[in-house]
Amino acid sequence: MGTAGKGAWVVPAPAYREVEGWEGAGDDAPGFRCAHSLTAVAPTKGHGPRLILFGGATAIETGASSGLPGIRLAGVTNSVHSYDVETRRWTRLHPAGEPPSPRAAHAAAAVGTMVVFQGGIGPAGHSTDDLYVLDLTNDKFKWHRVVVQGAGPGPRYGHCMDLVAQRYLVTVSGNDGKRALSDAWALDTAQKPYRWQKLNPEGDRPSARMYATASTRSDGMLLLCGGRDASGMPLSDAYGLLMHTNGQWEWTLAPGVSPSPRYQHAAVFVGARLHVTGGVLRGGRAIEGEGAIAVLDTAAGVWLDRNGIVTSRTLKSSNEHDASSDLLRRCRHAAASVGSQIYIYGGLRGDILLDDFLVAENAPFQSEITSSMYNVDRVPRGETQNRNNNFHSDSPVHQSTNNRQEAASGFSADKKSIDMLIEASTAEAEAVSAVWRAAKEASAASSEDSLSEGIGSESPLSETSPMPEDFDDGGSLEPDVKLHSRAVVVAKEAVGDLGCLVRQLSLDQFENESRRMHPSNNDQSYPGRRTLNRQRSPQGLHKKVISFLLKPRNWRAPADRTFFLDSYEVGELCYAAEQIFMQEPTVLQLKAPIKVFGDLHGQFGDLMRLFDEYGFPSTAGDITYIDYLFLGDYVDRGQHSLETIALLLALKIEYPENVHLIRGNHEAADINALFGFRLECIERMGESDGIWAWTRFNQLFNYLPLAAMIEKKIICMHGGIGRSINTVEQIEKLERPITMDVGSIVLMDLLWSDPTENDSVEGLRPNARGPGLVTFGPDRVTEFCKRNKLQLIIRAHECVMDGFERFAHGQLITLFSATNYCDLSCTRYCEQRRGHTCCRQGLSYRAKVNSSTSTSC
């Protein structure tokens, strides 16, 4: 059952079970194994996600002196096995190249489609500190030994290694054959020649230890957990290691009471939850009972076991036998996560070597957990990232919009441009479809929550959920929003020429993560913590950006494509904006008058023309009496994504109460890595700084608000209400920072869903963007507005041909503000401007549509 922790509902540690139906004949299956590594590798275009199992011991022996079982070094191997999550098949790999020596108790980490191995111990003794890379790119498996200059960590075993901030390989602790170690080293994968750097972090440093675990959270926090100290004592502490934007590393002690000290355990992050399993106590005694399965919820700052929040290390009594805890009575096993699922292979139970394969679901729904307790349904990586653009035409502003196809009949578009747009969007769908296919395995755990359930049904989802008790079903809403009849056209003009990974944690302290993960409209109190010293954003940086870029009348694309900010300035700009987003609720509460902008997609010239024609956010413009709201998709496709996002962030810093940004589906690394933004960052900032900046922007995107309410009458979002969103409260309960790979059905619908083709198509339909996505009919819109007492939904997301389109008899409006989407001059853009006047009946709203069009369609 969900329990409250620091103002948020938390879910107990999950139950584990054996993976059913997996295949692997002969030596394809890993067999009995302990002290090995298990590493999750991200999906590629041609292959879904997989697990790479390497090395370990295939036999054990009992020490004559201690009587305790240990690995037999003669039985240590260097075999490689791959588990295909989609097909549930184990395959032994035989990569080309010189393999690393047989080893156990080594460390491994994934870097893109490669797995890096370091250290360990084998028949020949300690392995060197050389880095070996298993390259899985294009399914051509090959070993490489990485050339590293200078001194390194040295030979060691029982240590930890992971990729931090998607750029730095960080290795921590271990044993060099003489003593337990406490040092930490980092290797910058984006900087050649490769060199190890010994870190000198600030903060509370962990003691020397071996057989600990270290796992990186998606936002760049490395969490070191447990281990055995120099005296052989098991440890129960946990420390977060983060890097500030000024390059300084810092250790911070994690809060909460862990269920048990342990070493030779396994731990892996899913979202903000670190899943810790198994391990042993002093003397090699296995951890039993509730302590065998634990979760450190870094969002709530609490440890959990199978029963809920842990308040002391005294095991709580339970009358029920927990078979899952018995399964995890083991040590020297290995764990990895794919999407929302945690996989465990092998290990040692007493003197028994194991060959079983287990799985659990992060924060699974249970019958006792009501939707009010735990609203966010975690779904696997990729279910929010499936694209196949469904091209629609729309009607002019003055025409009836009951039928989009009818309105488009008189539209003469360039067929080649349309075909190119469809082709480009199809490529986007293909790029993410592999992620979706791989995620189906995880989503099948609950048919009720499956993304494929009910797509063909015409019945709206709200039939299954009761209406609020205070809603008058017989009443009607007063139409207090009106569209201005005047449409203004702005000509499109060509602008510009078309010409390894980091996520830094911007928190000053570990405990502050709780505040970011649970934004709400009311203030929350948190216990006082020591504020860590941190370099703040230079006061003049955002003003420099505004001065350089905000030139509505005379901005021209620079001949030199080199971006005017360096990576350090990008980091500081993101940090300053991030602090503002962290304090904002997930659903913004805004006042009229306000302008609303649709997708920009890196079309900075379009943004400048809009500002030039209708006013711009400056004291010399109209910021003193009108606010600005942008509906997402600031990057990708266009040639000036960097200018677009940099200026919007600078304006947010300058006018935090007047300029508002919400998130679009392209504000996600897995999408904008493929469709222009990452490439633009590299092209214009250099490979190292470009990747740094790209990843820093994506970390910031995880904090963006997800929707906005205007005067509590109009809701603005990027995508739509899809199948799952019935109340505004569901959106408000989404926790930030939130990444796509730990997102929810609500998040997927919010960022990816579209209206149906026209008002005659009701209910839910499959979305041509990709499997698992839906379109929603006008009946869903009407019911959502009635249920939430709303007048209107404003959304973006679709490339509508006039930049403005009405749906559901005017209760939903789609905006699109990029004239040159995918470098095609066949789209139009618009902005919505809302004013208000006082009348006897109260406050009424007037919408004025300023629609702009391209000249070459």
Image (tube, rainbow, N blue to C red):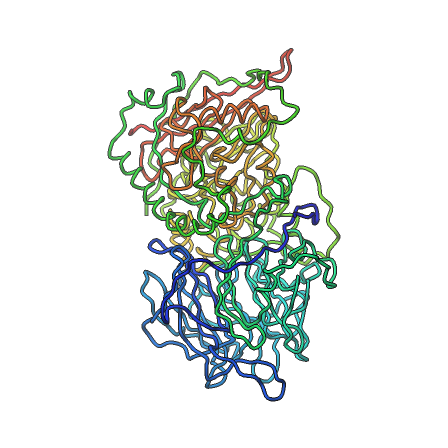
Residue plotted at (32% across, 20% down):
406
User: What x and y, as percent, mark residue 517?
Assistant: 62, 47
Q: Most extreme residue toward the top, as rendered?
A: 840
User: What x and y, as percent, mark residue 655?
Assistant: 59, 37
Question: Could you say which quadrant of the image residue 823 lies in?
Answer: top left
| Vertical relation: 553 (above or below) 27 | above
Report the front residue among 680 and 524.
524
Count all numbered tags in the image, as a single digit. Answer: 0
Report the front residue among 750 and 322.
322
| Residue 609, visible in the rendered structure | no
| Residue 839, visible in the rendered structure | yes
User: What x and y, as percent, mark residue 328?
Assistant: 58, 65
Side (left or right) of 814 relative to 278: left
Side (left or right) of 332 relative to 672: right
User: What x and y, as percent, mark residue 626?
Assistant: 57, 27
Residue plotted at (29% across, 21% down):
409
Q: Most extreme residue toward the left, as rendered?
A: 416
Question: Could you say which quadrant of the image residue 706 lies in?
Answer: top right
The C terminus lies in quadrant: top left
| Vertical relation: 220 (above or below) 618 | below
Residue plotted at (28% across, 34% down):
418
